[in-house]
Every structure is written in structure tokens, then in C-alpha cells.
Image (tube, rainbow, N blue to C red):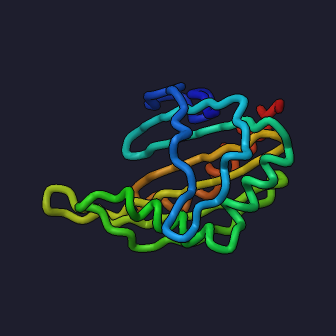
């Protein structure tokens, strides 16, 4: 999981929190099987700094083949993209509207690597602002990592390089 030292010298708040593994990919007509997957460990960290939010969630599955199955079902499955969009849209509040959801090009840093971008219009105090949310998924061996970064849309140009750097650092820590 992310550590404060990964993020820069000052201004970040947050740290390790109890991992929330309750959300699974499930949509009307698409409910990928999860009952045959055994999670043997999990960790999560959440950080904030001046309009930026970072979350990292790592889970270790019992076998490498379980990671491969999970990836096929929930990331590259033919209905996974549409379902992920549906699930993320359902989480938006009445003051938020999904403007864009797309798959991003992301370097293959590990056997499993994918990234998605949401652009959300947010209404606060009568003003509209655009927020970008990137979700980076990487996996190696028995470990899957999800890195979620949200920031003002004006900062999106610099996000990709930061996400690659953070994903590399997280992958370097994988021991299982």
C-alpha cells in the first residue's frame, strides 16, 4: 500500500486504514463469480493533500491462478468495462454527473495492468468544477493492487507520470 514517504515531503494527511473489500463487480445481468477466490491478506491506505486524494488497496489471494481468474472476470471480461462504469456511476451523488469514462493506455509494468479515467462534473455552492478520477489496477504473483487518484481536472496532465511512478513503487513491494 502507499506510504506517506511515497508522496512527497509535506502536506499529506492520512495513512493506513482498515481495508474495505466489500465492493465486488456486480451489475444487472453480470455477476462474475467470486466465491472460488480466497483472500489471504489485505491492506489499504488513504491520503489527502490540497484537492488531491489517493487510495491504495492491496489484496493477496491464495494462488496465482486465482489472480488470473479474477482478472479475466472483473477486468478483461467482455462486460466488465460496462459494469464498472455502471457501478461507479451509481456511487455519484445528486450534485455529481459523469462526463467521461474511458480506458487509459497504461504501461505493462506487471503481468496485469489496466487503467481507467472518470471525468466528473461536481456542483458545489452554485459553481461547477471538473474532477478527474483515475483507477489503476496492477497485479503480480498472488497480489492485486488498486490505486485510485482524484484531482481537479486542471491537474490531469501530470497524473499519468505520477500514477506510473506510484504503481512501480507498489509493485516493487509485492512479496506474495
The residue shown at (78%, 48%) is: 67
In the picture provided, is 132 more to the left or to the right than 92?
Answer: right
What percent of the width, then of the height, locates residue 129?
29, 63
Asked if 99 appears above or below 52 in the picture, the reply is below
Image coords of residue 113 (percent x, y) = 74, 57
Which residue is found at the position 56% from the left and 28% from the top?
4
Residue drawn where x is 52% and y is 47% of the image: 23
In this view of the protein, can residue 169 be seen by the observer?
no
Work out which quarter of the rendered image holds the C terminus and state it: top right
The residue lying toward the viewer, choosing from 49 and 15, is 15
**In the image, residue 118 lies at what x, y percent?**
48, 65
Q: Position of residue 95 (x, y in %)?
A: 24, 61
Q: Quadrant of the N terminus?
A: top right
Look at the image and tell me whether residue 93 can be seen.
yes
The one nearer the camera, 63 or 124, is 63
Q: Farthest left residue?
A: 126
- The front one of 28 and 88 is 28
Residue at x 54%, y 32% (from the top left corner): 19
Amino acid at each position: 500500500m502507499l506510504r506517506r514517504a511515497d508522496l512527497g515531503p509535506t502536506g499529506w494527511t492520512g495513512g493506513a486504514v482498515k481495508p474495505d473489500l466489500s465492493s465486488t463487480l456486480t451489475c444487472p445481468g453480470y455477476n462474475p463469480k467470486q466465491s472460488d477466490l480466497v483472500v489471504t491478506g489485505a491492506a489499504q491506505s488513504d491520503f489527502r493533500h490540497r484537492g488531491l486524494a489517493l487510495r491504495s488497496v492491496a489484496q493477496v489471494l491464495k494462488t496465482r491462478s486465482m489472480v488470473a481468474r479474477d482478472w479475466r472476470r472483473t477486468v478483461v471480461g467482455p462486460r466488465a468495462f460496462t459494469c464498472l462504469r455502471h457501478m461507479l456511476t451509481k456511487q455519484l451523488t445528486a450534485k455529481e454527473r459523469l462526463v467521461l469514462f474511458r480506458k487509459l493506455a497504461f504501461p505493462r509494468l506487471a503481468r496485469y495492468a489496466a487503467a481507467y479515467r472518470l471525468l466528473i462534473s461536481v456542483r458545489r455552492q452554485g459553481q461547477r468544477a471538473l474532477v478527474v478520477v483515475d483507477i489503476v489496477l496492477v497485479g503480480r504473483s498472488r497480489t492485486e493492487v488498486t490505486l485510485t487518484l482524484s484531482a481537479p481536472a486542471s491537474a490531469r496532465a501530470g497524473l499519468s507520470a505520477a500514477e506510473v511512478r506510484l504503481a512501480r513503487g507498489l509493485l516493487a513491494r509485492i512479496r506474495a
